[in-house]
Image (cartoon, rainbow, N blue to C red):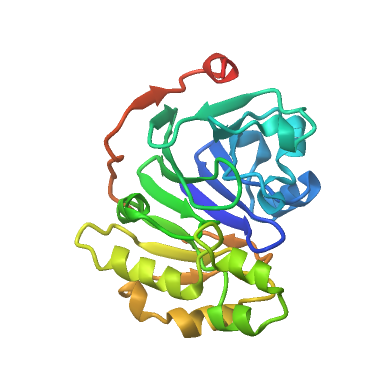
């Protein structure tokens, strides 16, 4: 059985969990180990089933709790091949799995393809996953989207997409000009209107397989659930169910009965044993 949840999302801390039977993994952890385990327990996820932590990038709202959770549960962390993770941690993560953007990797029930995002953090990644028969894409912390992101989203049953800020709230807010420009830049975040444009393009395609959309990573000061709904509306999702994840909220995923998906063609690497993982 496939299960998933947004354990938390927003400006302060982000984390997602995905489970298939007794196999699960986490993407990002901006929470303390104690808090992330509390959130997992509340939603009935067993930490003993965790096999990996995937890291999108090194900003603290995604990285802060990764090292402690890796240490506590003896987990490997999946990172961009060009990322020197020890520069941003205490150097206590013993097992790192370096992956190449655009390449397919498999391990047991899981297949995934990392892809580069456009953000002001080195070696930032988004991910296209297939776990069992369910495919899903996570795209956050990117100042713009590109054709590869569109292609991965179209092939997904579930889409997790950043809708970080309201242009109106940002420009009329108290942030200094340099910070406003950083957020609005091609290395910043997606606005509500950019997320709407993305969804219109993806869901308007005949190839679109999406059955559920989650809008996430809302700014604390420059967005709200109500603002997302008013600026994005329902038309852009082409009647696909859409859920806006409020800041700090844990959202249990809606079960899906999805058809088998196919990964985007490309090079493939098998991660068939922990000895191979440890060699990275």
Q: Quadrant of the N terminus?
A: top left
Q: Among all residues in the image, which is located at the extreme left?
A: 206
- At a point 50% along the width and 50% down the height, the residue shown is 3
Q: Is residue 279 above or below residue 131?
A: above
Q: Is residue 178 left or right of residue 168?
A: right
> Would you say 104 lies left or right of 124 here?
left
Residue found at x 35% / y 43%: 133
Note whether residue 255 is visible. Answer: no
Expressed as whole percent of the image width and height from the top left, the position of residue 135 reads 38, 47
Q: Give whichever of 268, 84 is nearer the camera.
A: 84
Which quadrant is home to the C terminus?
A: top right
Q: Nearer the viewer, residue 246 or 264?
A: 264
**From the viewer's perspective, is residue 77 above or below residue 63?**
above
Across and down, in percent, residue 106 comes to 41, 29
Q: Is residue 127 visible?
A: yes
Q: Is residue 208 left or right of residue 16?
A: left
The spot of residue 237 in percent (x, y) is 35, 72
Depicted 237 relative to depicted 88: above or below: below
Q: Residue at x 56, y 55 (%)?
A: 5
In the rendered image, which quarter is residue 262 located in?
A: top left
Instruction: Name the spot of residue 41 as percent of width and height, x first.
Output: 70, 50
Q: Residue at x 57, y 73 (%)?
A: 165
């Amino acid at each position: 059985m496939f299960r998933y949840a947004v354990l938390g999302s927003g400006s302060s801390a982000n984390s997602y969990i995905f489970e298939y039977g007794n196999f699960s993994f986490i993407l990002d952890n901006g929470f303390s180990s104690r808090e992330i385990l509390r959130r997992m327990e509340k939603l009935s996820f067993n930490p003993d089933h965790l096999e990996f932590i995937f890291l999108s990038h090194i900003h603290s709202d995604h990285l802060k709790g990764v090292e402690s959770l890796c240490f506590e549960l003896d987990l490997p962390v999946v990172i961009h091949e060009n990322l020197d993770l020890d520069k941003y941690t205490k150097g206590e993560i013993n097992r790192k799995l370096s992956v190449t953007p655009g390449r397919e990797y498999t391990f047991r029930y899981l297949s995934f393809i990392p892809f580069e995002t456009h953000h002001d953090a080195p070696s930032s990644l988004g991910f296209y996953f297939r776990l069992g028969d369910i495919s899903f894409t996570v795209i956050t912390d990117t100042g713009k989207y590109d054709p590869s992101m569109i292609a991965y989203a179209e092939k997904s049953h579930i889409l997790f997409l950043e809708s970080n800020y309201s242009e109106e709230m940002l420009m009329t807010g108290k942030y200094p000009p340099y910070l406003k420009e950083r957020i609005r830049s091609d290395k910043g975040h997606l606005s509500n209107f950019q997320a709407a444009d993305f969804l219109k393009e993806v869901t308007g395609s005949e190839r679109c397989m999406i059955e559920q959309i989650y809008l996430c990573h809302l700014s604390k000061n420059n967005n709200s659930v109500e603002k997302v709904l008013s600026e994005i509306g329902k038309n852009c999702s082409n009647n696909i169910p859409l859920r806006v994840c409020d800041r700090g909220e844990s959202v249990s995923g809606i079960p899906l009965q999805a058809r088998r998906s196919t990964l985007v063609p490309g090079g493939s690497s098998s991660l068939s044993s922990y000895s191979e993982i440890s060699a990275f």
